[in-house]
Image (tube, rainbow, N blue to C red):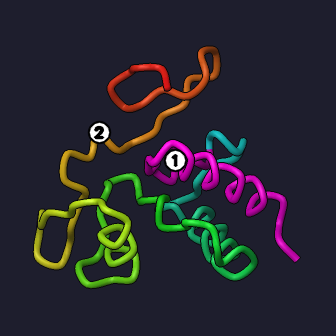
Amino acid sequence: MASTRAAEVAEILWELKRADKVATYTEIAGRAGFSAGSNGRTMIGCIDRVKKDWPHLQWWRAINDEGLVDEGSEHATKLVESGFSLENVDEGKMTLAEIEDHLMSWNGQNGAVDAGGEEE
């Protein structure tokens, strides 16, 4: 059975899919009403649960706070398959090209806004 946190994260992943955006662990956790945890551990656990209980959801839209994914990982593959471009930043690490254009951020008073501050 899915945890309440994982269910909230699942809803947010659906929101990200509709907006064709990605979001950091901290942004998603904050939107869901909890802390992402040390090094995103709480979010990683939620993502693992989402992958198990809702395999159709696009879990890969959640990225760590540094915006990095491991080169050659399932995460990187899913992002590329979905049309996101990745660029190398360090040996074995990649990030989304023009990441600011793809990041979702939420503003509690005005609803969803993208990373550039424009309302969605």
Res 41 quadrant in image: bottom right
Res 86 quadrant in image: bottom left
* Percent x, y of residue 78: 39, 74
* Distance CA(mark 1)–CA(mark 2): 18 Å
Q: Which mark is residue 101?
A: 2
Residue found at the far top of this picture: 109
* Percent x, y of residue 39: 47, 62
Residue at x 25% of width, y 56% of height: 96
Helix, strand, or loop for circle 2? helix
- In this picture, residue 118 sits left or right of residue 88: right
Q: Main secondary structure of the magenta part?
A: helix
- In this picture, residue 16 sits left or right of residue 45: left
Indicate whether 68 appears above or below 109.
below
Pointer 1 local density, CA inside 10 Å: few below 14, some 14–19, many at least 20: many
Q: Nearer the viewer, mark 1 or mark 2?
A: 2
Helix, strand, or loop for circle 1? helix
Residue labelled with disc 1: 26
**Kind of residue at disc 2:** Asp
Indicate whether 85 appears above or below 27.
below
* Percent x, y of residue 90: 11, 68
The residue segment tinted magenta is: 1-29
* Percent x, y of residue 15: 62, 46
Which image quarter is the N terminus in?
Answer: bottom right
Res 64 quadrant in image: bottom left
Name the residue nearer the viewer: 65 or 13. 13
